[in-house]
Amino acid sequence: MSNQGGNTVTHRFGTVAPLLLALSLLLDPVCFAGTPGPARLIKDINQTASFTSGSFPTGFVDIGDTTLFLATLPTTGSELWKTDGTEGGTVLVKDIFPGPSGSVRRDLFQIDGVAFFAALDPVHGVELWKSDGTEAGTVLVKDIRPGSDSSLQLPLNLDQSQSLIYTALNGNLIFLADDGTRGLELWRSDGTEAGTILLKDILPGLSSSVNQFGRLV
């Protein structure tokens, strides 16, 4: 391992790795300065007695000293969790859709200390939510498509990258939504209901100007 221009480079040496690793430490000890300790389990979130059990944490974003992420349990489905790096501080933030169905449908996107995400509840469908890492501060931003129909599209392939469905511009969230009357179009949100608006109906009418595979950069 060496440090080149601030970038850590790992060399693979096969069976002579121990000797060369020792030599690399002697020649370049600086590259290990500040290296964290060994990896450890913070919390066994899903303690279901099954070989394949797991909470499948994903979508990590930092909000101050707290990290928000998604975790899945048989009793709650995919919901919003947070951790401060301790077992006691790794907890469910809010069960938005009570029961095993789960609410959070896409990864988190952080802007200025606020996490935005798409979540499902039986009253509003899949809509835009935000969280400051507290239960009280985890709220629906706007029911863009009123009623139980969804304004935010679900990916057909849940394994596909979901990190490009949002982007930030001048402190605002830019995303794709369908309000039921103008198709899937480009929207903007400042995190408030009044500040969540359609940017432009590019293809006027019910037809969409973009599709659910759209990527924002």
Image (cartoon, helix red, strand yellow):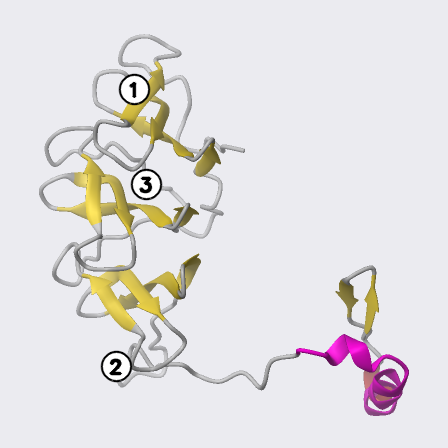
Indicate the position of residue 163 as horizontal and vertical percent values. Answer: 47, 46
The dominant secondary structure in magenta is: helix
Q: Does the residue at mark 1 contact the one at mark 2 (Cβ under 8 Å)?
A: no
The quadrant holding residue 55 is bottom left
Indicate the position of residue 122 as horizontal and vertical percent values. Answer: 11, 46
* Image position of 160 with respect to 212: above or below: below
Q: Earlier in the sequence, mark 1 or mark 2?
A: 2
- Mark number, residue 183: 1
Stretch in magenta:
17-34
Q: What residue type is labelled 1?
A: Gly
Indicate the position of residue 71 as horizontal and vertical percent values. Answer: 32, 65
Left or right of residue 46: residue 60: right
Instruction: Characterize the local packing of mark 1: few (<14), some (14-19) or many (20 or more) Cα atoms within 10 angstroms.
Output: many
Residue at x 19%, y 59% (from the top left corner): 135
Q: Quadrant of the N terminus?
A: bottom right
Q: Name the residue under label 2.
A: 48
Q: Which secondary structure lies at badge 1?
A: loop
Cα separation between marks 2 and 3 = 28 Å
Q: Name the residue under label 3.
A: 154
